């Protein structure tokens, strides 16, 4: 049974896509903690981030670095915060969040944004991805 993230990667479930390469996929979190909250995942289904091989882990982090640069350019913020939780979806992923304060990293404060706003945010980040 594929994970929800594999179903997003295959296009079976829609997402606000940010970027993709052969082995990685980035898209907006459906319930962002801050606007621009992005998930970066390996296409390979591995449940736990730290079970990735050294080379897959390094490649994922390097891809996340490129995505973070695009998020930082697209969304006014002081930093792009990085976190790993993985309690909900058993498919390794990295959370990237535009933040201005430590409180912006509070995962108790998830929101739902209108679809047009999510698409607008995704388009702006996509335009800055290199
Ligand atoms: P974690 O596994 O790191 O605890 O949390 C998984 C994250 O994935 C959550 O922040 C949640 O909002 C997000 N998420 C869960 N299901 C979906 C989905 O179907 N689409 C998107 N875009 N994000 C999801």
Image (cartoon, rainbow, N blue to C red):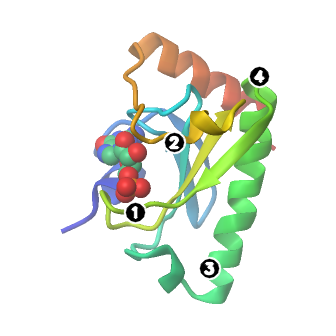
| Distance of label 4 from label 1 (alpha carbons) | 27 Å
- The reply to whether dot 3 and dot 1 touch (C-beta < 8 Å) is no
User: Residue 56: which disc?
Assistant: 3
- The reply to whether dot 4 and dot 1 touch (C-beta < 8 Å) is no
Label 3 vs 1, first from the N-terminus: 3
Label 1 vs 2, first from the N-terminus: 2
User: Residue 29: which disc?
Assistant: none
SS for callout 3: helix
> Given this view, does label 1 or label 2 mark the residue nearer the observer?
1
Query: Does the Cβ of the disc 1 residue fall within 8 Å of ligand 1?
Result: yes
Q: Residue at x 67, y 46 (%)?
A: 81
**Residue wearing tag 1:** 86
Left or right, 86 with respect to 121, comes to: left
User: Residue 76: which disc?
Assistant: 4
Residue positioned most to the left: 1
Residue 104, quarter of the rendered image: top right
């Amino acid at each position: 049974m594929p994970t929800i993230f594999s179903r997003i990667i295959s296009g079976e479930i829609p997402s606000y896509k940010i970027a993709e390469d052969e082995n990685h996929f980035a898209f907006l979190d459906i319930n962002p903690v801050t606007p621009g909250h992005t998930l970066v995942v390996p296409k390979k289904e591995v449940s736990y981030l730290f079970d990735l091989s050294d080379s897959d882990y390094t490649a994922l982090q390097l891809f996340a670095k490129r995505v973070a640069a695009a998020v930082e350019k697209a969304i006014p913020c002081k930093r792009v915060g990085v976190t790993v939780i993985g309690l909900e979806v058993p498919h390794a992923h990295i959370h990237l969040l535009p933040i201005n304060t430590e409180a912006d990293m509070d995962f108790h404060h998830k929101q739902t944004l209108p679809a047009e706003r999510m698409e607008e945010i995704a388009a702006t980040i996509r335009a800055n991805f290199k």
